[in-house]
Image (cartoon, grey):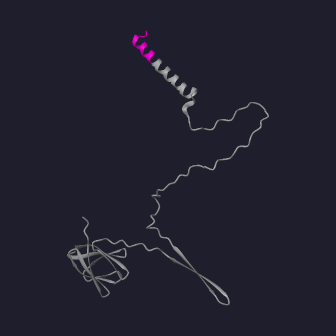
Amino acid sequence: MPMTARDRRTLIIGGVILGVMLVGYLLLNVVLGGGDDTGGAALPPISVGPSQSTQTPTQGPTATGSPVINFTGRDPFSIPGALATTTVPTSTTTTTSTTTTTATTTTTTTPPTSPPTQPGGGSSITIGGHTVVLLDTFTSGGGEVAQVEVDGKVYSVSEGETFAQGQFELITISGDCATFLYGDEQFTLCATSPK
C-alpha cells in the first residue's frame, strides 16, 4: 500500500516532536545534570584490579537521625479513657523515730469513679448515694407505669410499688411526672420527652 501525502505529513510532524523531546531530555538530564540541587552524595571512584589505595576513615551516621513519625490519632478499637477501669495506687510512708525506727507502707487502691450520666431538665436526682432517673411514663394494661433507672438498672413500676431492693416507692404518676419516696424523703421527677 503506497503512502499518501497525509501519512507522510503525520510521520514528519511526529518525528519532529519526538526529536525535540529527545533533545530536551538529553539537554536537561545529561548535559546540565538534571537540575538536582539536593547536594546528593557522589559515588566513590571505582577501580578495577588490585591497587594500593589509602582510604581515609569515613564517619558514621550523622546526629540528625531519621525523621520521627508522630501519630496523634487514637486507636479506634481501644476502650476510651472515660470507660476504662484502672486502679490508682496510693502509697503513704510513715516513719516514726523513737529508740527504734519503724517504717510502715500502706497501699490503698481506689478505683476511679465515673460520673453518672444525668439527663437535664429535672428528670434525674442523686439521693442517698443513688442516681434516680425517670425515663418515661406510659399506660400498660389499663394502669399507669413509670420506667425508672436507679444506678444504671431500669425498673418498670406501678403506683404503690417498691423497687431497687425496696429502697424506693412510686407514690403517684401525673402525666410525664412521678412522685417517689426514699426513706422519708419525697421527691418528684418529670420525664423529658426527646423532640
Q: Which residue does the image show at 56% across and 36% down from the upper left?
A: 37
Quarter holding the C terminus? bottom left
Question: Please, is residue 52 above or below residue 150 in the view?
Answer: above
Q: Of helix, strand and loop, which mostly describes the magenta segment?
A: helix
Q: Which residue does the image show at 26% across and 70% down from the upper left?
A: 192
The answer to which quarter of the image holds residue 182 is: bottom left
Quarter holding the N terminus? top left
> Percent x, y for residue 26?
55, 25
Instruction: Indicate yes or no whether the magenta region holds residue 2.
Output: yes
The answer to which quarter of the image holds residue 32 is: top right
Q: What stretch of residues is rendered in magenta?
A: 1-13
Q: How many marks?
A: 0
Instruction: Indicate yes or no whether the magenta region holds residue 154.
Output: no
For this view, does 65 lie left or right of residue 120? right
Question: Please, is residue 100 above or below residue 141 in the view?
Answer: below
Can you name the residue that lies furthest to the bottom here? 99
Q: Which residue does the image show at 64% across and 36% down from the upper left?
A: 42
Question: Please, is residue 62 above or below residue 40 in the view?
Answer: below
> Percent x, y for residue 150?
34, 77
> Percent x, y for residue 136?
26, 72
Question: Please, is residue 186 above or below residue 37 in the view?
Answer: below
For this view, does 192 lie left or right of residue 82? left
Residue 106 or residue 55, whichever sits in front: 55
Residue 113 or residue 79, whichever sits in front: 113
> Percent x, y for residue 51?
78, 33
Residue 108 or residue 140, whichever sits in front: 108
